Image: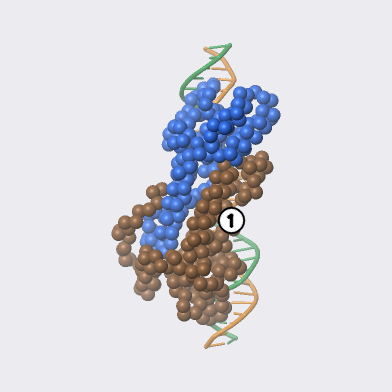
Chain colours: A blue, B brown, C green, D orange
Amino acid sequence: MKLTTKGRYAVTAMLDLSLHYGKGPIALADIAQRQGISLSYLEQLFSRLRKKSLVASVRGPGGGYSLGRGAGEIYVGEVISAVDENIDTTRCNGAYNCHNNERCLTHELWSDLSSQIYNYLNKISLQDLMDRKTVREVAARQDHSDQEGASGLELALADESSDLAGA
Amino acid sequence: MKLTTKGRYAVTAMLDLSLHYGKGPIALADIAQRQGISLSYLEQLFSRLRKKSLVASVRGPGGGYSLGRGAGEIYVGEVISAVDENIDTTRCNGAYNCHNNERCLTHELWSDLSSQIYNYLNKISLQDLMDRKTVREVAARQDHSDQEGASGLELALADESSDLAGA
DNA sequence: GAAATCTTGACTATTTTGCTTGGGAATGTA
DNA sequence: TACATTCCCAAGCAAAATAGTCAAGATTTC
């Protein structure tokens, strides 16, 4: 499997988007700042996410991104696949030509592992992540230091923490 | 997780070693030829495997490598860990400093995934792999074409009905 | 002592990653 | 209309990782 920061950034950004969504689209610049990801890099990732309809975009002032569907219907595996091209552990990517144009000794091992990982990640939705206590804690911290650092222009998200009991 | 050809080569080579072991040590050159892996590259990998006692070596003519313990007691996860340094999917490798010196939003997701993969691979021994029908088939083909030389024009890959990883 | 084999370290080519740059295009606001 | 704000896109690039080479040496068997 290819699990690089590309996939990690994508999932992190999508989770940030889920957490802050609710009152209109979220600008990438906000996500970039909160999650410490380069804006241009995020743009590239979101371009791919958009092509897979995982997010929808609105241009112009006040624009930004929103989720393509409900947070409960977007799965981590999809997000990683969207940005990482392939989520396969085999060298041949399932083509059975790993060695001398034939299947290598360990081909089945890697394809089994791929399905294993794929199944695992495709059972976890963004909503599942949002429901996790640790995620809410980190999110609250990030929103807090956001206000301190950015002279409090982007308020109105502190009430997020009172909604937490609902999970 | 880091799953590259390094880890794949290591497992493949260890499996080849297991399959051919029994009548004294196996020279790396044989494994390199059978599995299509560069000899010098294999040497590097086996150097690490030896440091972890996964293999034992005998120098001189007739020398080579043997398994450090029984094939049923060597697990795929160990082999990959030995050559790949870390098998962790988090950016911080578990150090909780992924973002601004603090835990990132998705830290737990990646560490959970790591354990998932780790547990999976650490339940599969080399003996388990040897017992697989597909492995024995490929091994038989490789031993056979070994005798014929390198051209290996036998086609036998159209019959693959085990379409697993839907990646 | 010569050949086979492991052992080691340095070096290199290639690919991938993560990111920048530099333009656009759409859209809301004044 | 002007203009700022946002998304959109493609090319390029430095650093890192990967995959592999090369050269020298250490052991052992014959």
Residue at horizontal 48 percent and vertical 28 percent from the top: A57
Q: Mark 1 points at which residue?
A: B86
Residue at horizontal 62 percent and vertical 33 percent from the top: A140
Which quadrant holds residue A100?
Answer: bottom left
Q: How many marks?
A: 1
Residue at horizontal 50 percent and vertical 58 percent from the top: B121
Q: In this view, does A167 lie above or below D19?
A: above
Residue at horizontal 67 percent and vertical 24 percent from the top: A152
Position of A93 compared to A33: left or right? left
Q: Position of residue B117 (x, y in %)?
A: 51, 54
Q: Position of residue B67 (x, y in %)?
A: 52, 72
Can residue A160 be seen here? yes
Give amino acid for label 1.
Asn
Can residue B142 be seen here? no
Q: In this view, does B163 lie above or below C5?
A: above
Q: Position of residue A104 (x, y in %)?
A: 41, 62
As rendered, which of A138 and B142 lies closer to the eye? Answer: A138
Q: Position of residue B119 (x, y in %)?
A: 52, 56
Q: What element carries label 1?
A: loop
